[in-house]
Amino acid sequence: MNTQHHHSSPNSPQGGGWFPISIRLSGARVLLVGGGEIAVNKGRLLLDHGARIDVLAEKLHPVVQSWVENGRVRHVGERADEAVLRRLLPGCRLVYAATDSRDANRQVAALADELNIPVCAVDDPGPSSFITPAQVRRGMVRVAVSTGGAAPVLARRLREQIETLLPEGTGRLAAYMQSRRALVSGRYPNVQDRKRIWEDFLDGPGAEAARSGDESRADTRLEALLDGERKSGEVWLVGAGPGDPDLLTLKALHLMQNADSVLYDNLVSPALLDMVRRDAELVFVGKQRDRHALPQGEINREMVRRAQAGERVLRLKGGDPFIFGRGGEEVEALVEAGVAFRLVPGISAANGCAAYSGIPLTHRDCAQACLFVTGHAKADGVLDLPWDDMADRRQTVVIYMGISTLPQLAAGLLGKGLPVDWPVAIVERGTQPRQRVFTGTLSTIAQQAADAQVKSPALVIVGQVVRHRVVSS
Ligand SMILES: C[C@@]1(CC(=O)O)C2=NC(=C\c3[nH]c(c(CCC(=O)O)c3CC(=O)O)Cc3[nH]c(c(CC(=O)O)c3CCC(=O)O)/C=C3\N/C(=C\2)[C@@H](CCC(=O)O)[C@]3(C)CC(=O)O)/[C@H]1CCC(=O)O
Ligand SMILES: NC(=O)c1ccc[n+]([C@@H]2O[C@H](COP(=O)([O-])OP(=O)(O)OC[C@H]3O[C@@H](n4cnc5c(N)ncnc54)[C@H](O)[C@@H]3O)[C@@H](O)[C@H]2O)c1
């Protein structure tokens, strides 16, 4: 079994090296250098989190002035010069350099750095050792969005989007779970067991009860789980779509974030695997033409073995599991073994490539039907295809896995009487960042593909619809 771990290279730190943490500010001293608009913004945040703020600034914004007057912050000095800073910095948990002078902010940052005190220069992430993410707050729950200083306005926009997604009761849910942790730990000393109980709780109706403040109903659900009412292992057969992670279904995403293990194909892109729960085991079972990582029978046995051991197994497949995905065979194996399963469709390559290349699959003028065929040859190299059906001119033919057999495919269709100028398109790496689209005819396409070194994954679209291709300006 080939269990893959993803490591990023040490030369290109993730997110520019900005590592998000939660830092305790209650009771901690924070130095705020500058007393203007931005100091008000940062001061509000800091006060909300219980910091003791010292302000060093020449001119105070009326809001800061009022904080000083009612004793919420101390005004500890005017000008930020080196001697004053050396006196004020020691003992601070954080420092904000929030003056409107770039030089002053840089000087504060340099001195704080020397003393190993985290510092944020609000006019430049360059000399900063921390930056402030945009936050969504629900009680104890915080969602922080950072762009690593790249685009603060984007951070703000994303915050607004998350704001609308995160249920109002999320804070109550966290508080409920906190209040019952001792109870659960007392009954189940094993971390894995506790994790499963909490996940089952969150997946079930208890979570909604806690969110809405109905603690007694939440307790009933939790007690049932503590008494051993267990979700057993199961397999989720999920289509991951054609490549662009945004084309996942919400259901696929939800299951990706709950799986214990993920068995995935080579058609599943690294960007998608990044969205899988961090501690899920990733198992590559992909096939490449002529080079089987795992024979189908072994994949089936592996799914069954894991599910019977109680795992929630995600079988993640490129595209849709039931369109050239062998999903049928896998489900039969699960049924035979008595393993519970769920099926989630994915956007198939035909749909994804059609939309992202601007080629409609049907068109009132020329294509009343659409035929999906596989261009994958049998072991003896023979293409076993419904050639007569494929040569019908009033339809579109979409060929999956047809790149290596493209010369045979084109010749076969010409042999069935389609004209030499019959339109054909190839969409390589459809929906992905480096998508390439080639258009030609039955007589040119094989040579075009060879010249451009087109590689799998690629989809072939045959028919008059190719002439209706639209490209957005
Ligand atoms: C999240 C938030 C936190 C907060 O303050 O609460 C925050 N900026 C917010 C909003 C915002 N900031 C700016 C605009 C006006 C549009 C514009 O002018 O471009 C708006 C929009 C608005 O105000 O609506 C301008 C701006 N910001 C920085 C620079 C300097 C530079 O980039 O070099 C300039 C240019 C100044 C100039 O050109 O003069 C720098 C920083 N701003 C950061 C955080 C840190 C990076 C966070 C990240 O992306 O990871 C970092 C590096 C340092 C820090 O402050 O910690 C808050 C969201 C509030 C919310 O939640 O809605
Ligand atoms: N990080 C952010 O979210 C963000 C957003 C917008 C703007 N900015 C940047 O923040 C900076 C501050 O903007 P502002 O609107 O608060 O300015 P402001 O003019 O309202 O306030 C400036 C403050 O700095 C003080 N000051 C200047 N030099 C000083 C020194 N040597 N010692 C002590 N205090 C000094 C002034 O007395 C005043 O209190 C600007 O450079 C602006 O570009 C940051």
Image: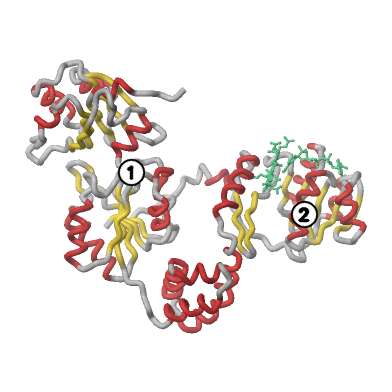
Cβ at disc 1 under 8 Å from ligand 1? no
- Where does label 1 land, which residue? 347
Q: Residue at x 47, y 67 (%)?
A: 202
Q: Looking at the picture, how far across and down is residue 414, in whole percent?
A: 12, 21
Residue in the picture at 34% in, 44% down:
241
Q: Position of residue 32 (x, y in %)?
A: 81, 51
- Quadrant of the frame with the N terminus: bottom left
Amino acid identity at mark 2: Arg
Q: Residue at x 90, y 56 (%)?
A: 68
Position of 172 relative to 458 (above/below) = below
Q: Which quadrant holds residue 136?
A: bottom right
Query: Residue at coordinates 20% horizontally, 50% vertically from top-left?
Result: 326
Compared with 129, 459 (above or below) is: above
Whether residue 351 appears in this view of the structure is yes
Note whether residue 130 is visible: no
Give, as a three-letter code, the residue at label 1.
Answer: Ile
Residue toward you, 25 or 258:
258
24 on left or right of 166: right
Quarter holding ligand 2: top right
Residue under pointer 2: 44
Q: Measured from the top left, where is residue 422 in percent x and y?
A: 20, 19
